[in-house]
Amino acid sequence: MLFLEAIAKIPIILGSQSPRRKELLSSLDLNFEIVVREIDESIPAGVLAEDAAEYIAVEKIKAFAELSFSEHIVITADTVVVDGEGTVLGKPKNIEEARMVLSGLSGKSHCVYTGVAVAYHGEIRSFTCETIVRFRTLDKEEIEYYLNKYKPYDKAGSYGIQEWIGRIGVDAIEGSFENVVGLPTARLYDELKRIVLSL
């Protein structure tokens, strides 16, 4: 109970406008406010696909560097989907791109990486969690139904595992389900515990 009592006294900021990350962080019974800072989310050449999410998470947290946030715990995150060929699949620009991405993921495995950065008292800690997701073969009707009803244009990899497509399409998952949704809660909880109990 020492950790929960201690962290309850520290103001927490979630630097994300994702409703999924908000829901996941809320599920840890932590009180926080949402503050979003816009940054350039382009990934420089030379950053490996598996490091891209953590790179962006760290860039996001640098936008909270001013002194007014030093007494807050600030949490930022980014999620990327990487197909079997090592291509980073970002948020689709339109339905045609989303259709192409889902067709490419159909019947195959891919990796989901969520990078998380946590800042407190000027120190930044960051980590990446990996989850392997395998889709069964999706038929065209299923892809079209999902795209037209759920419109997953705000989601990396053109899908949300917590939605209909995840219920009917995911064959197997190796790693954290929450990581695929957008925030690896168990790993984040451990990281917060380490930070707070080391004070």
Image (cartoon, grey):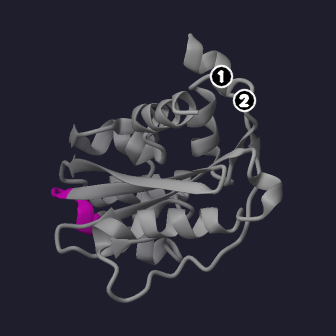
Q: Within the image, what quadrant is residue 173 found in?
A: top left
Question: Toward the viewer: 173 or 197?
Answer: 197
User: Which sits earlier in the primary sequence, circle 1 or circle 2?
Assistant: 1
Q: Is residue 59 above or below residue 138?
A: below
Quarter of the rendering occupied by the C terminus: top right
Q: Residue at x 74, y 59 (%)?
A: 36
Q: What residue did someone put label 1 on?
A: 6
Residue 66 seen anywhere in this rendered image of the structure? yes
Q: Residue at x 52, y 62 (%)?
A: 57
Q: Residue at x 29, y 76 (%)?
A: 48
Q: Which secondary structure, mark 2?
A: loop
Residue 108 magenta-drawn? yes
Q: Is residue 9 above or below residue 154?
A: above
Q: Is residue 50 above or below residue 121?
A: below
Q: Which secondary structure, mark 1?
A: helix
**For the magenta stretch, what is the residue range?**
103-109
Question: Toward the viewer: 125 or 128?
Answer: 125
Q: Nearer the viewer, mark 1 or mark 2?
A: 1
Location of residue 2 in the rendering, given as x and y in whole percent from the top left corner? 58, 14
Q: Residue at x 57, y 55 (%)?
A: 123
Quarter of the rendering occupied by the N terminus: top right
Give the residue type at disc 2. Answer: Asn
Give the residue type at disc 1. Answer: Ala
Location of residue 188 in the rendering, given as x and y in whole percent from the top left corner? 47, 38
Is 100 left or right of 74, judged from the image as shown? left
Location of residue 196 in the rendering, given as x and y in whole percent from the top left corner? 57, 32
Check disc 1: other Cα within 10 Å, few if <14, some if 14-19, many if 20+.
few
Location of residue 19 in the rendering, given as x and y in whole percent from the top left corner? 64, 45
Q: Within the image, what quadrant is residue 140 found in?
A: bottom left
Task: Name the disc covering residue 31, or none.
Answer: 2
Residue 8 magenta-drawn? no
